[in-house]
Image: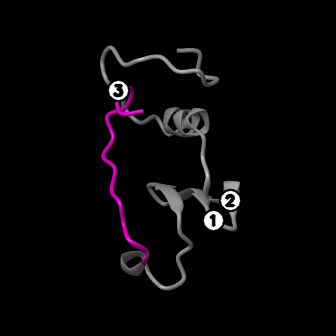
Amino acid sequence: MAKDFEIDLVIVTKSEAGPDTKAPAVYLNDQVLCEIGGIRNGKITEAELFDELSAAKVPRKPGGGSCACSCGS
């Protein structure tokens, strides 16, 4: 993923996120992509994440790699 997208990853501990936050979880801006006991049960595949980042129009790195997801790159 790092070779394909211009994106900053931020790791937040559960204590920093708040008492009602489910962990593990993956967020993109204010959208929950997965969370334990909820959507995708806390797991997201590389292909699903690639599709979510592409749909959100996250900038791609020039000459980024290819993937096996539905984007066709």
Q: Earlier in the sequence, mark 2 or mark 1?
A: 1
Mark 2 and mark 1 in contact? Answer it, CB < 8 Å: yes
Q: Is residue 28 above or below residue 68?
A: below
All told, the count of numbered labels is: 3
Q: CA distance from mark 2 to mark 3?
A: 26 Å
Mark 3 and mark 1 in contact? Answer it, CB < 8 Å: no
Q: Secondary structure at mark 3?
A: loop
The amino acid pointed to by label 2 is Asn
Q: Residue furthest bottom?
A: 19
Which span is picked out in magenta? Answer: 1-14
- Residue 26 falls inside the magenta stretch: no
Q: Position of residue 31 (x, y in %)?
A: 54, 57
Q: Residue at x 39, y 26 (%)?
A: 4
Q: CA distance from mark 3 to mark 1?
A: 27 Å
Q: Secondary structure at mark 2?
A: helix
Query: Which label was assigned to residue 41?
Result: 2
